Amino acid sequence: MESIFNNSFATLVAYVGIVSIYLLVIPLILFYWMNNRWNVMGKFERLIVYGLVFLFFPGLILFSPFLNLRLRGDSKG
């Protein structure tokens, strides 16, 4: 019985780890990458970013109320 509990616990820990990476870690890295490289990306890098946005969209939606990617324009009036 103890081995079943440990196996279930290990499975639960694995699921929590995978979900947290998918919903928290990679979207934050993607936000940071897009924010720093948006104006200097090449076309292939932008294509990769669009693919990653499609892939990690649920995590990006979770952070969208708190983070934004507004471009920093000129500080002129």
Image: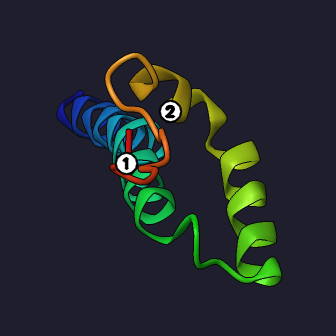
Q: Is residue 48 above or below residue 15?
A: below
Badge 2 marks a residue whose secondary structure is helix
Q: Is residue 3 above or below residue 65?
A: below
Q: Nearer the viewer, residue 76 or 6?
A: 76
Seen at 43% across and 57% down, the residue is: 35
Q: Is residue 29 above or below residue 6?
A: below
Q: CA distance from mark 1 to mark 2?
A: 35 Å
Residue 76: mark: 1
Seen at 71% across and 78% down, the residue is: 45
Give percent across and percent down for residue 28.
36, 48
Give the crowd class for mark 2: few <14, some 14-19, many >=20 residues within 10 Å.
Answer: many
Pointer 1 or 2: first along the chain = 2
Residue 59: mark: 2
Query: Which label sits in the foreground, 1 or 2?
Result: 1
Badge 1 marks a residue whose secondary structure is loop
Give percent across and percent down for residue 48.
74, 70
Seen at 38% across and 38% down, the residue is: 77
Give the crowd class for mark 1: few <14, some 14-19, many >=20 residues within 10 Å.
Answer: few
Give percent across and percent down for residue 63.
40, 27
